[in-house]
Each structure stands twice: as structure tokens, then as C-alpha cells.
Image (cartoon, rainbow, N blue to C red):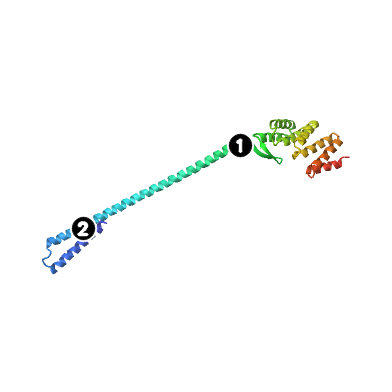
């Protein structure tokens, strides 16, 4: 830039000098050496003034460019901080959602839940299902004595449970497995009496009929089987009852 302005000053001076020296012959006596020198000095002064202004303008532009770079860096920094905060917020929101989901799941374990048991919907209290399943597992493993005890405990503890008819039915089966025919018959009769429309009712009647047949009570068994056919016509249990009736002589 310095070479450029030096050249401009030289060119301007040369131009002025050329003009002065050219004009001397045509206008002899108009400009003397002092006037020519003054003209050159004035032009040099103007050139230096313009150079100073240009340099100032360049410094201003450079300063503004530096400030713009700084602003861009600040914007980039703020953008990075904003992204970090957004990620932290997203993480916190997910943690909060997971926390409340887990809390809700835990609380539900202590609240009654609607559940369907053997096609019948009802309200199940906390611990009900686990208690019933534990008794059922004992029965499946062949521990009929403890299964009978567990089913009795369940029936006593959850009198309004939708598991009641099913629990009583399996209590009857546990007693039957223990060869307590009288006790099992009494339990099954309770199922038929208290839950006549429940899916376990015709199965309880068929179990009673089998008990009666095993004890040689053919007349009683025939009557029970006929009750099944009449009361639960069209069901699979009714078909089984009809098949047994045809075998009684």
C-alpha cells in the first residue's frame, strides 16, 4: 500500500510539474519557481491527506472485520452452549419421564387393578394374583396338601376376588387328590350354588358326578349329569356329561 501511494504522489507531482513546465513557454512570466513549488506542495498535501483518509478507512474496515470475526466466534460459542443445554434438557426430560413411569408402575402394585379371570372381569387387589399363582404352582407340582391350605387361605383373604370361583374349584381338586371326596364335593357344590353362571360351575358339577360314580352312587351321579345337560346345554361339559350318561347302566 505504501508503494502504491508513493507512486501516486510521484505521478501527481510529475503531472503537476509537467503542466507547469509545459505552461512556462506558452505563458511566460505567469508562474515563477515559487508558485510551481507551492503547487507541487499543495498537491502533495492533498495526496497525503487522501492517503491518510484511505489508511483510516482501511483500519476501520479491518477493525470491523475483526469485530465481525469475534461476533461470529461468540455466536458459534453460544450456539454450542445452546446445543449442550438442549441436550441436557432432553436428558433431564427423559430421566423425569422414566422416573414417573417407574413410580407409576410401583404405585400400581399397591392399587386395585381390573383383571379378567376365566372370562370374568373384576377388581384384583395387590398381591392377589401372586397368591393365587403360588397356590396353583403347588398344585401343579403335586404338593396337594399345601395347595389345599394355600387355596383356603386365598379364599378367606380375598372374599370378593374374581379368582374366588376358580380358587374354590381348584381347592376341590386338591381335596379330591387327597381322597377327601366328601370335602371336595362340598366345595364344588358351593361353586355351583354361588356362581351358577361362571365357567367353572359346569366343571364343578361334572367333578361331583365323577366323585359320585367312584363311590358307587350311580343314581346320584346320573341326576348330576342330567342337571349338567339341562342347565348347560351346548357346552363342551354338557357333551361330556351326555357321554357319561350313556355309559351308566
**Tag 1: Cα neighbours inside 10 Å, few (<14), some, or many (≥20)?**
few
In the image, is 55 to the left or to the right of 187?
A: left
Task: Give the spatial CA distance, label 1 vs label 2.
Answer: 91 Å
Q: Earlier in the sequence, mark 1 or mark 2?
A: 2
Name the spot of residue 81 as percent of width and height, x first: 43, 44
Name the spot of residue 29 as percent of width and height, x first: 10, 66
Q: Can residue 87 be seen from the camera position used here?
A: yes
Name the spot of residue 98 as percent of width and height, x first: 55, 40
Residue that label 1 marks: 108
- Pick the residue in front: 146 or 184: 184
In the image, is 4 to the left or to the right of 211?
A: left
Residue that label 2 marks: 46
125 over 20 or under it: above or below = above
Residue at 22% from the left image edge and 56% from the top image edge: 49
- Pick the residue in front: 2 or 77: 77
Q: Can residue 140 be seen from the camera position used here?
A: no
Amino acid at each position: 500500500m505504501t508503494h502504491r501511494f508513493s507512486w501516486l504522489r510521484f505521478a501527481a507531482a510529475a503531472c503537476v510539474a509537467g503542466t507547469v513546465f509545459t505552461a512556462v513557454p506558452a505563458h511566460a512570466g505567469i508562474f515563477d519557481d515559487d508558485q510551481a513549488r507551492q503547487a507541487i506542495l499543495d498537491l502533495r498535501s492533498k495526496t497525503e491527506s487522501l492517503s491518510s483518509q484511505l489508511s483510516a478507512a482501511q483500519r476501520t474496515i479491518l477493525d470491523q472485520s475483526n469485530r465481525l470475526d469475534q461476533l461470529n466466534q461468540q455466536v458459534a460459542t453460544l450456539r454450542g452452549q445452546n446445543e449442550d443445554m438442549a441436550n441436557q434438557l432432553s436428558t433431564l426430560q427423559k430421566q423425569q419421564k422414566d422416573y414417573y413411569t417407574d413410580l407409576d408402575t410401583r404405585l400400581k402394585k399397591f392399587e386395585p387393578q381390573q383383571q379378567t379371570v376365566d372370562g370374568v372381569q373384576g377388581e384384583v387387589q395387590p398381591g392377589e394374583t401372586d397368591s393365587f399363582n403360588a397356590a396353583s404352582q403347588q398344585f401343579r407340582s403335586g404338593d396337594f396338601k399345601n395347595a389345599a391350605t394355600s387355596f383356603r387361605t386365598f379364599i378367606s383373604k380375598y372374599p370378593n376376588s374374581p379368582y374366588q370361583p376358580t380358587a374354590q374349584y381348584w381347592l376341590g381338586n386338591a381335596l379330591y387328590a387327597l381322597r377327601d371326596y366328601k370335602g371336595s364335593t362340598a366345595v364344588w357344590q358351593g361353586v355351583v350354588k354361588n356362581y351358577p353362571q361362571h365357567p367353572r360351575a359346569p366343571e364343578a358339577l361334572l367333578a361331583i358326578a365323577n366323585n359320585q360314580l367312584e363311590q358307587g352312587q350311580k343314581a346320584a351321579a346320573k341326576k348330576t349329569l342330567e342337571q349338567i345337560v339341562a342347565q348347560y346345554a351346548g357346552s363342551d361339559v354338557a357333551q361330556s356329561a351326555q357321554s357319561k350318561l350313556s355309559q351308566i347302566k
